[in-house]
Amino acid sequence: MSKCDKFGNLIEHMSEHDGTKRSAQACFIIKRSKPKGAKELADVIRENKLEENIIGWHLPMFGESDKLVHFCKKEAGKHDFYNGKTTSSMSETEKQRKKSWNEWYVTDCVTHADDIDLCADIWKLSPEINKKYPSVVKMYMGTDIGEGWHNFHGDVQTELGEK
């Protein structure tokens, strides 16, 4: 049984929300594209990257993950500012603003991936990548992770021409 057969905070991040979202994104790529190394992940990013964010990538392919989309919609509903709920006493402008913020939150939650986090999470959840980039030293960066992901991330950046 693969780690990615489950849905949840598989990377054991200190934030349940971030850990679940990031795990879902990493597992989506692992299951769909089966990257064996940095070149394969770089190819996935290059083929699916819509635009460069300040930090990370905007990857519309994650919209194909029903579980991730459902999770992000549920999370938006927990926040008054992002839930999209309107009342009859709101002006049309206020209603539109609520709708726009809800759409932004859900879209950003689903499609935004921090490049460093995504590489670290794929490294952690993919036995093949983890084996190819081994670690001895453990580090704590929101989640316990080995040092090998640094080399993996660096190789992905080199493949993308971002380094």
Image (cartoon, grey):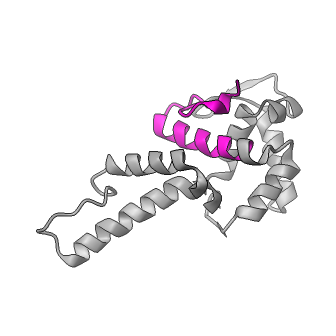
- Observer able to see residue 140: no
**Chief secondary structure of the magenta portion:** helix
Question: Would residue 95 be found to the left or right of residue 113 on screen?
Answer: left
Residue 29 image point, x, y percent:
71, 47
User: How many marks can you see?
Assistant: 0
Residue 115 image point, x, y percent:
68, 52
**Who's the residue at 77% across and 37% down the image?**
149
In the picture shown, does residue 153 fall above or below 46?
A: above
**Who's the residue at 43% across and 58% down the image?**
105
Question: Would residue 100 be found to the left or right of residue 136 on screen?
Answer: left
Q: Nearer the viewer, residue 27 or 93?
A: 27
Question: Would residue 64 be found to the left or right of residue 83 on screen?
Answer: right
Residue 140 image point, x, y percent:
63, 29
Residue 46 image point, x, y percent:
78, 63
**Who's the residue at 77% across and 56% down the image?**
44
Quarter occupied by residue 86 = bottom left
Q: Quadrant of the C terminus?
A: bottom right
**Who's the residue at 41% across and 51% down the image?**
73
Task: Let me know if residue 8 is in the magenta part.
Answer: yes
Instruction: Give the residues in magenta.
Output: 1-30
In the picture shown, does residue 121 fall above or below 69?
A: above
Question: Would residue 144 be found to the left or right of residue 17 on screen?
Answer: right
Q: Quadrant of the N terminus?
A: top right
- Observer able to see residue 77: yes
Q: Nearer the viewer, residue 117 or 98?
A: 98
Q: Nearer the viewer, residue 136 or 102?
A: 102
